[in-house]
Image (spheres, helix red, strand yellow):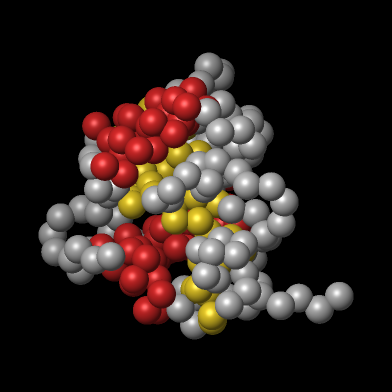
């Protein structure tokens, strides 16, 4: 297919070194201009493009280089990505509170046919947007190398993937979500498909990771 596969990245922004792969970007928080001090968005972008080098990123900066975001910023970013016609949206973060405006934003983009993936911790309370129906929940699975997926049956998430970045740095569920987003983006270039069925089909491992004490 010649059509660009657009991947929405709700994160902390992407550095200028990846500008040639960015279709559009917008900041949804008040923060001074400058590079992403956390580097999180850049790491996720590199993971996605590693698996789907032809993808075009739509970057919604909802962190502004900080460690926290708000439901309002995420909802605004989702609405922008809907207008920009993202096909897949990567959300490598989790908020503790369920907010009506965020739930409504999620429902709107799902109704438009977008594929949403969000990080879900291996332990602890449910987080959002991973906790909303229709969002594919991803966690880190140490069994998985880059490019591999585990089907977890919903506990603690729908699927697991490699919890490390391209340089081997640990990133848990956040980085795992990036790996799955990239793999689905690459598959989407071949045509339409059911994302849940596709991930089940290509899973190397089935059932939860068993960790020894």
Q: Nearer the viewer, residue 11 or 65?
A: 11
Q: Going by the image, does 77 lie left or right of 41?
A: left
Q: Residue furthest left?
A: 2
Q: Going by the image, does 111 lie left or right of 70?
A: left
Q: Residue at x 35, y 38 (%)?
A: 107
Q: Which of 119 and 99 is in front in this view?
A: 99
Q: Going by the image, does 101 lie left or right of 99?
A: left
Q: Going by the image, does 173 lie left or right of 111?
A: right
Coordinates of residue 152 in the picture (x, y in percent) = 55, 71
213 relative to 168, above or below: below
Is residue 12 visible in the rendered structure shown here?
yes
Image quadrant in which you'd find residue 161: bottom right
Q: Which residue is drawn at 58% across and 77% down?
A: 207
Image quadrant in which you'd find residue 154: bottom right
157 relative to 113, above or below: below
Q: Which residue is drawn at 66% across and 75% down?
A: 209
Q: Residue at x 40, y 79 (%)?
A: 202
């Amino acid at each position: 297919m010649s059509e660009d596969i657009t991947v929405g990245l709700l994160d902390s922004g992407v550095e200028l070194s990846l500008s040639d792969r960015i279709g559009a970007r917008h900041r949804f928080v008040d923060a001074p201009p400058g590079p992403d001090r956390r580097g999180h968005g850049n790491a996720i972008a590199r993971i996605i493009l590693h698996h789907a080098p032809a993808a075009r990123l739509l970057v919604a900066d909802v962190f502004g280089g900080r460690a926290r975001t708000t439901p309002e910023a995420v909802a605004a970013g989702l609405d922008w990505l809907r207008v920009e016609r993202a096909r897949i949206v990567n959300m490598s973060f989790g908020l503790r509170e369920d907010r009506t405006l965020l739930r409504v934003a999620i429902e709107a983009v799902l109704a438009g046919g977008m594929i949403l993936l969000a990080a879900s911790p291996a332990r602890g309370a449910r987080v959002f947007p991973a906790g909303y129906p229709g969002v594919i929940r991803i966690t880190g699975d140490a069994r998985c190398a880059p490019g591999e997926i585990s089907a977890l049956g919903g506990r603690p998430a729908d699927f697991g993937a490699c919890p490390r970045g391209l340089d081997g740095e640990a990133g848990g569920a956040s980085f795992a979500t990036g790996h799955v987003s990239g793999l689905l983006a690459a598959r989407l270039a071949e045509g339409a498909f059911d994302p849940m069925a596709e991930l089940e089909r290509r899973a190397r491992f089935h059932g939860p990771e068993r960790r020894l004490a």
